Image (cartoon, rainbow, N blue to C red):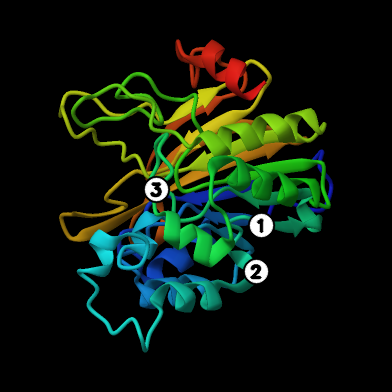
Amino acid sequence: MAGQGNQNQGIKIAVVGDVHDQWEAEDGEALRHLGVDLVLFVGDFGNESVRVVRAIASLDIPKAVILGNHDAWYSASEWGRKRCPYNRKKEDWVQDQLDALGETHVGYGKLDFPELNLTVVGSRPFSWGGEVWKNIDFYEKRYGVTSFEESSSRIVEAANSAASDTIIFLGHNGPFGLGDRPDDPCGKDWEPVGEDFGDPDFADALAQTKHLGKSIPLVTFGHMHHHLRYTDDELRTCVAKSPDGTVYLNAASVPRIVQNGSDRLRNFFLVSLQAGVVSEISLVWVGKEYTVESEEIFYQRDEKALGETGFLTAANQVFG
């Protein structure tokens, strides 16, 4: 593996997009063949799929995880509770997932990786996105949080306690400021299209953390799938970079496992860090015998045409 505890040396990070029940033993083996130093999971493992989460919790590679809206599908909202397939008085599948993940679940928390000279900080877990504070009872009962302001404070508190000054932020939904257009990383792609569906508390926490003097090379998340709901003619923009150097990655390439003839291909985003700065981001599809069957480069540090779009100035105003 690349990381050697020296920030001047390269670090290879895999980011696994929304899983939606597509996780197999071969995925863990593929990650080992890719030789990654760290794996980040953006959530949505299934509709409170304890089985999938336990399988990922058993993965023996350094990892950090955040749970998504589907991971509290039957618990967060009244709509979901009415459809719950289990006896909520006797079982709590949300808590079962949290217990399985332990410290690797970084929602409203952090996990230090001293051997890599970085800390992963989690934003608000179970996020559905948007500028309306949703699932009031769920967040108050689980976390004692009742507003975006209180949520932001929890995230900043975690960042402030990080052992490293280099922080990677991990969310399920991305921060507000990466939207407006439906094909933006956090743009609303259902009618009426075009609204920024990012998390305001996440954006505020990022801005406060930067003011603390922390370095944030990477912010990664999922939730808003690359395939747009209103058109088949284009895909979502998945990478953006603000002028202050932070790179934002939406990793929700769904489905993440596809059948290609007799072969099954599984995707992973690979992020390379050099001296604490993102140098390259690519999407790889791994096939038989764990070989990389295809690779698409989405960002390279020395190529301004990659990863830069027209809303970067607005993003810098939000996060700078």
| Element at label 3 | loop
Q: Which residue is mark 3?
A: 134
Labels 1 and 3: the sequence-earlier one: 1
The residue located at (60%, 73%) in the rendering is: 102
Q: Which residue is mark 2?
A: 103
Q: Residues within 10 Å of mark 1 (few under 14, many from 20)?
A: many
Residue type marked 3 = Lys
Where does the C terminus fall, quadrant-wise?
A: top right
Residue 302: quarter of image: top right
**Pair 2/1: label in front:** 1
Q: Are marks 2 and 1 in contact (CB under 8 Å)?
A: yes
Residue 96 in the figure: left or right of residue 151: left
Residue 60 in the figure: left or right of residue 276: left
**Pair 3/2: label in front:** 3
The residue located at (57%, 54%) in the rendering is: 145
Q: Where residue 224 appears, x then y in whole percent?
A: 34, 39
Q: Which residue is mark 1?
A: 109
| In the depicted structure, whether residue 290 falls above or below residue 245 | below
